């Protein structure tokens, strides 16, 4: 049987743009269900926040690193040493949901990943661009996983 991108993903780095808490919660619930039924053993989620959102008001989650423009030093260095350590690891798949106009973008692009997938945007640094017609987190995630399950890989 051929291996697909999704089936061969055991480590996943996911970047998600925060709009509001209910959108984040819906995304997290949908993601939990998908990851539970997958081969993913290592998952890191970076949630990009606008500067005005106080990350301390958001629900803590051991898989989520909340990241805002305030999390960078004057010289552009990432202040979160735990997140920096995660970004030193390599991943099978990077899934980026939302705008690439984020301070964390250049840091994430340095991460060693086998494949980079961008959802509902276009950018030259990604291998695959997927466009979902839905704006519902669960539907977008299901669409991405279904699509990546259809793409065979030859390694």
Image (cartoon, rainbow, N blue to C red):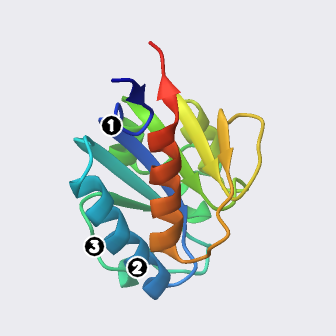
Kindly state the secondary structure of the residue where label 1 is placed: strand
Mark-to-mark CA distance, 3 and 2 = 15 Å
| Crowd tier of the residue under label 1, counting other residues whose Cα lies within 10 Å: few below 14, some 14–19, many 20 or above | some
**Would you name the residue on which mark 2 appears?**
26
Spot the residue most to the top: 155
Task: State the residue at coordinates (45%, 85%).
Answer: 21
| Crowd tier of the residue under label 3, counting other residues whose Cα lies within 10 Å: few below 14, some 14–19, many 20 or above | few
Counting residues from the start of the chain, the first of labels 3 and 2 encountered is 2
Q: Is residue 142 left or right of residue 30?
A: right
Counting residues from the start of the chain, the first of labels 3 and 1 encountered is 1
**Would you name the residue on which mark 1 appears?**
11
Query: Taking the image as drawn, is residue 75 in sight?
Result: no
| Count of all numbered marks drawn on residues in the image | 3
**Would you name the residue on which mark 3 appears?**
60
Instruction: Name the quadrant containing residue 7.
Output: top left
Query: Taking the image as drawn, is residue 98 in sight?
Result: yes
């Amino acid at each position: 049987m051929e291996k697909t991108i999704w089936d061969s993903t055991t480590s996943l780095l996911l970047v998600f743009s925060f709009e509001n808490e209910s959108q984040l919660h819906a995304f997290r619930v949908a993601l939990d269900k998908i990851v539970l039924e997958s081969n993913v053993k290592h998952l890191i989620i970076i949630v990009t926040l606008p500067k005005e959102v106080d990350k301390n008001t958001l629900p803590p989650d051991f898989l989520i690193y909340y990241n805002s423009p305030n999390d960078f030093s004057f010289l552009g260095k990432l202040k979160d040493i735990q997140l920096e350590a995660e970004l030193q690891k390599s991943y099978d798949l990077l899934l980026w949901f939302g705008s690439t106009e984020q301070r964390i973008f250049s840091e994430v692009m340095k991460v060693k990943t086998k494949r980079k997938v961008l959802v509902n945007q276009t950018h030259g640094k990604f291998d695959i661009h997927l466009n979902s017609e839905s704006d519902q987190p669960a539907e977008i995630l299901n669409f991405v996983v279904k699509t990546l399950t259809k793409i065979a890989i030859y390694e």
